[in-house]
Amino acid sequence: MAIKNFAIRSITGNDLDAVVAIELECYPHPWSLAQFLQELENPVATILVCEDETGIVGFICYWLIVDEMQILNLATAPSARRNGVAAQLLEHTFNNFLPQELASVWLEVRSGNRAAITLYQRFGFVPQGTRRAYYRDGEDALLMVKKVLEQ
């Protein structure tokens, strides 16, 4: 895997077209522009974009409520996969919190998405359960958690 250095920053309104385009390429039931706009207005939501010399190549959206983070959406443009985009987004996200500020991180991932599951395990996520038929097409979601601060 070729690891590149990317610029990671908060999303702006000018980034929405690129983010929605990546979303459409990555998911069979993508978020709409309206959903991204809703997250921009949500006080507990953060959206970060990752860019290289070609433009935006990935993004992460998460909620932070007290000391728990919920990762809602993480995507890498297909043309930029296997270059460390998702890993750098996760690392950047976690590095912005002191251990005492973040107790746990939660996410759901398609049970058949082996690449994503492997990535999350590399970051310390462990399976916590299964949400049966979670996705519109009937696929299960694997609920994963990363414990940061042991209670």
Image (spheres, grey):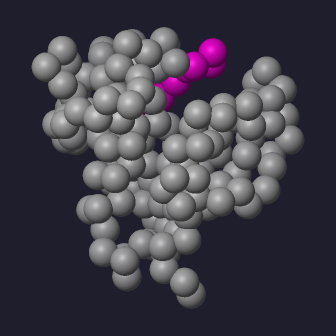
Front residue of 114 and 76: 114
Residue 49 locus on image (x, y percent): 28, 34
Q: Is residue 39 visible?
A: no
Does residue 46 appear left or right of residue 147 in this picture?
A: left
Quarter occupied by the N terminus: top left
Does residue 76 appear left or right of residue 125 in this picture?
A: left
Front residue of 44 and 60: 60
- Residue at 66% of width from left, 34% of height from top? 114
Residue 47 locus on image (x, y percent): 33, 41
Relative vertical location of residue 34 with respect to residue 46 in this rendering, above or below: above
Relative vertical location of residue 107 with respect to residue 18 in this rendering, above or below: below
Does residue 34 appear left or right of residue 144 in this picture?
A: left
State how many labels appear: 0
Front residue of 28 and 57: 57
Q: Is residue 5 visible?
A: yes
Relative vertical location of residue 82 with respect to residue 79 in this rendering, above or below: below
- Residue at 52% of width from left, 24% of height from top? 31
Query: Which range of residues does the magenta coloring cover?
Result: 27-36
What is the residue that sits farthest to the left in this orientation?
53
| Residue 49 in magenta stretch | no
What is the residue that sits farthest to the front in this orientation?
1
Front residue of 122 and 146: 122
Q: Main secondary structure of the magenta part?
A: loop
- Residue at 38% of width from left, 49% of height from top? 90
* Image quadrant where residue 30 sits: top right
Quarter occupied by the C terminus: bottom right
